[in-house]
Amino acid sequence: MRTSVKSAGKGKAKSSSLTGVIEKPIELPDGMWDRISRKAYELWLQRGCQEGNALRDWLDAEEIVMEEIHEAHE
C-alpha cells in the first residue's frame, strides 16, 4: 500500500521532534581548534601529503594536543 502525500505532515512533525534530540556540539577552548589544525597539517606533511587520511590526521592531532595539555597540567 502506498502512502499518500497527505501523510507528509506526520513526517514533518517527526523531523521537528528529532531536532530536539540533536545536541549542541562541544565547543573547544580558545585556540584549541587552531592547535589541532596545525598539528594535523604537520602530520599530513610527515606522512608525505597523502590524500584520504584527513580524519586520521585530525584524530591523531587531537590525541597529541590533548596529551600535551595533560602533561602541562601535571
Image (tube, helix red, strand yellow):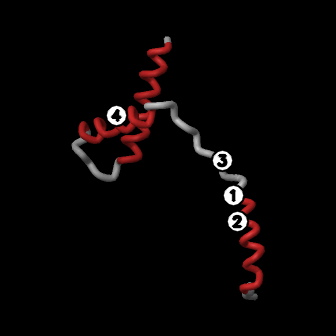
Q: Is residue 8 above or below residue 65?
A: below
Does the residue at mark 2 contact the one at mark 4 (Cβ under 8 Å)?
no
Quadrant of the rendered image containing residue 42 = top left
Residue ID for mark 1: 19
Which part of the image, by quadrant, shows the N terminus? bottom right
Callout 3 crowding tier (Cα within 10 Å): few <14, some 14–19, many ≥20: few
Q: Earlier in the sequence, mark 1 or mark 4?
A: 1
In the drawing, what numbered circle is on residue 39? 4
Residue ID for mark 2: 15
Q: Secondary structure at mark 2?
A: helix
* Structural distance between the alpha carbons of marks 3 and 2: 15 Å
Q: Residue at x 39, y 43 (%)?
A: 56
Q: Secondary structure at mark 4?
A: helix
Does the residue at mark 3 contact the one at mark 2 (Cβ under 8 Å)?
no
Q: Residue at x 33, y 52 (%)?
A: 52
Q: Secondary structure at mark 1?
A: helix
Give the residue type that dot 3 points to: Glu
